[in-house]
Amino acid sequence: MKPNKKLINTLIILLIFSMVIVQASSDKTRFGDTRKLILPSYSVLDENAQPLISASGKIGFIASITDGSLISFNLASGKILSSTIVGESVGPISMVEANGRRLIAVPAANLPLANHPATVTIVDATKAKQLEVAALLALPSTTQITPTTQALMTQDVKFCVIASSFDEPTIFSFNLETGEIVSQFPLLGRPSEVALFDDGQTRTLAVASAVSNNVALVKVDEQGQLISSGNFSPAAGRFDEANNPAFSADGRTLFIAAAQGDRLFAINARNGELISDSAVEAPQRLTVAPFRGSYEMLGVTRIRRPVNNKRGGVTIFKHLRKELMLQSEFTPPDGIEFSRSNNVVFTDSGAAAFVGSTTGVLFAFSTETGELESYQVIGNEIRRLVLSEKGKKVAAVRSSASGDEVVLTAFETATSETRNGDAPAITALKPDVVEQGYANNLRVMVQSENLSAGDALLINGAEVATDFAKGNGLAAQLPKSLFKQTGEISVQIKRTDGSVSLPMALRVVQAQAPLLDAISPERLPSPANAFTLRVKGSNFRPSAAIFINGEALNTLRHDATELQAKVSKELARSARQFTIEIKDLVTPDLVSNAKTLNVVGPVIDEIKPYNEVVVAGDRSFQLRVSGDNFREGVRLHINGEAIPLSLTHRYNNKLLIANVPGRFARDAGKLSVAVRNPDGEDSNAVKIDAHAPEISAFAPEQIIAGVKGARVELRGANFRRRASVYVGDGKGVTYKVNSRRVHFISSKQIIISFTGVLKKLLAKPGIVQIQVVNPNDGDGVVSQTQMLKVAAPEIADALVNPIDGDDTNSRLLIQGANFRRGAVVEFLKAGEVVRQQAPVNLRGNRITMVIAARQLAALGNFEVRVINPGDIHSNAKDVAHETLATSNDE
């Protein structure tokens, strides 16, 4: 078996690149063991084959286009559990898990012209070892679909929608119980990609068409009827077959990229109107990350284009306040290639993302910075990925000469700063009160920080079917049987890691009981003084009174929706937490739901460094701390250590300015900042970063091998005066650049000179590793290693053309890059040098020579290569011949 030269070259690059990974601490994503699900030789997975993983993280599914089978497998062992044949030329599968069942929709193109219509088989995969057909949906006999077509089921498993391709593109909506078509919707062009949003209340289907350059938005109502919501066609750009639509967590926004035009669009999913757009190079597939609480995050894969030869990778955007903003870019080293099949997947926290490559390397990287965190070489031709947070596995479809397979790679992620294993806390429950005897099932929504699709709700201690819906929320339907008696219903969050929140009560109150919606204030600074408490709600009778911790207050009633009362200083200082209720003094059984008012210490809302960022190793830095309840004598603490009081200036109870000595940020990392009032009360802790130096680019982008010296500009951020620079060949040889050859220009720019012994690094083609080390009172603060390419001459084209008016000579034109003065051209036959000649004219990207016609005739077919001074060879290139055109025009 011949070695894969492309993969070997990539491995060499990654071994050099791995110096970055070796230095990574334990807070990075790491890959573990790899298992392979090897399929039978007759089971072929095409580039559209999409693996699926169950919510439990234990079972996976894949469909084979050739033998038309759906296959289930064990994620831990990598063994096939079962398979069932559903048709011919099956497309990407989809899955819904609801009401204790797991259903998979498998479309099959079949052969409609041979009286074998296209179908969608609904497979009951609740028992992974016993796959059963639950329903068979047949499309009209004149309808055709393609192996890229996907069928999607609604979350209540009542309807299935699928878009046909020929002859008249149409969306069909099927009733899953009867198998009948309940609605049809015509499309403007053949569909390429589809997406369905369904949160139990709103269902919207998005169908992208590369042919018509359009996205159709279609509402699916409660009866399965298809109703147009709008269309979007980009004015600047065209979709291609890989550009897929994807919905935001609340379903209000649709994202899609246009490969032709290099744009990313955010669209109003209700009417198709453009919200915002942004530039992105060569965009392909798009994925929306789990909602992070304040903004949407999405990743777009990029491919290399022959036109500009820019490297592929992944671009991460955030969508905040109706604007698309670049967050980070992941661009692996040269030699890594991506295809239209490659997609990016995110962890539940959104902190890390994964992407495969056709070169055969699986990458994990930080979404915040784009920094590579880990990689795993699993073999060439990686296609689609799917990730399971519960199963801690990434499943990748891979094609190889010996057969197709699904590669299962284990991973471990960093414990998130915000999901650190502590119990989750419910921040809101809506509604939090319901009247006794409520006649319908009730949908409740729970909000918390950093929820994921794998989290669940516990109702009175029992786990119930839970939807991840409307941003950072979990929703569930409660049966009306729970509302027969007054009392409290316990609601809790259970995370995927098993941690459970404290319960919050859903109160079942008597009909006509007062309902409490809001209180003001919601929190008090400590120590509390007398204050006026205002409450709003409904059903406040003239005999209603405000109770605080069980004590009735002298209450003023404005109307049936608003009450207020004065809270004395003594009562205000009697507790740190107050329970507020409304009780009817005439009918004591009429009691409202409760709200909580907290007496709090200092609170930090925002921290801003005066110079935008804190640079690790600086002699000092200044912080602006905004919040509330900062009292005289307040102290600022960083990582538990107090800043000297003389360096902390309190402007008022909402603003502090602190001059922080450099020893508090000696090394790069997280700084935990809190304030403490003189009475010993601590605020919440807010984390900020102390940044290391960062190299982002070089100018020039590469050096031509063999030059006698070079000046290279390092561009980036957080460079400090007297920073040191280290350079090396990646093979164990490292030099510290003489300080006289390091020119500090600004915090974003350093220029280094390769002189003396450093010139050895430029003598031959390869890579120079470069690091910047900022000074501190220890060993310094080290940047990530970046690679500067040392390039050989490259020939792109070699062409012989006649010289007008000279039959005895011809011109040889060589075009490419990195040609140096003093270069010679070698002529090769069968790999052997038969002639050597100096150019007539030489530029960096062009060489011109004159050759006698008789010599050309003697050479016949031959190759050329350029030899730069220092015996540095270019690639060999076949020479093409051009004839002189003649014309009859005067």
Image (cartoon, rainbow, N blue to C red):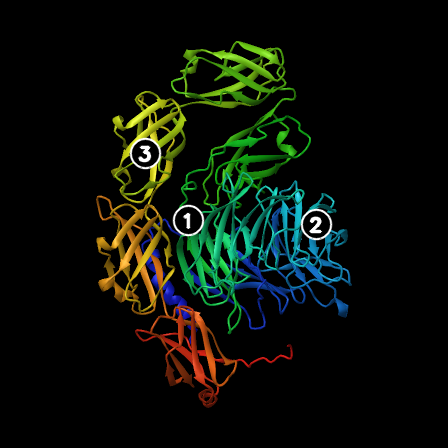
Furthest-front residue in this view? 890
Name the N-terminal-most of marks 2 and 1. Answer: 2
**Does residue 797 sit above or below 170 in this rendering?**
below
Q: On the picture, is 518 further left or further right than 603?
A: right
Name the N-terminal-most of marks 3 and 2. Answer: 2
Q: Marks 1 and 3, how far apart in space?
A: 24 Å
Name the residue nearer the viewer: 722 or 88: 722
Query: What residue sits right under mark 3 in the picture?
Result: 622
Q: Marks 3 and 2, how far apart in space?
A: 59 Å
User: Could you tell me if residue 53 is visible in this image?
Assistant: no
Name the residue nearer the viewer: 78 or 452: 452
* Three-letter amino acid code at the position of disc 2: Phe
Quarter of the image with the N terminus in it:
bottom left
Residue 149 horizontal/vertical position (percent): 66, 59
Q: Residue at x 53, y 21 (%)?
A: 519
Residue 260 horizontal/vertical position (percent): 59, 57
* Three-letter amino acid code at the position of disc 3: Gln
Q: On the picture, is 135 further left or further right than 590?
A: right
Camera-near label (1 vs 3) is 3
Q: Marks 2 and 1, how far apart in space?
A: 41 Å
Quarter of the image with the C terminus in it:
bottom right
* Secondary structure state at the residue bearing disc 3: strand
* Secondary structure state at the residue bearing disc 2: strand
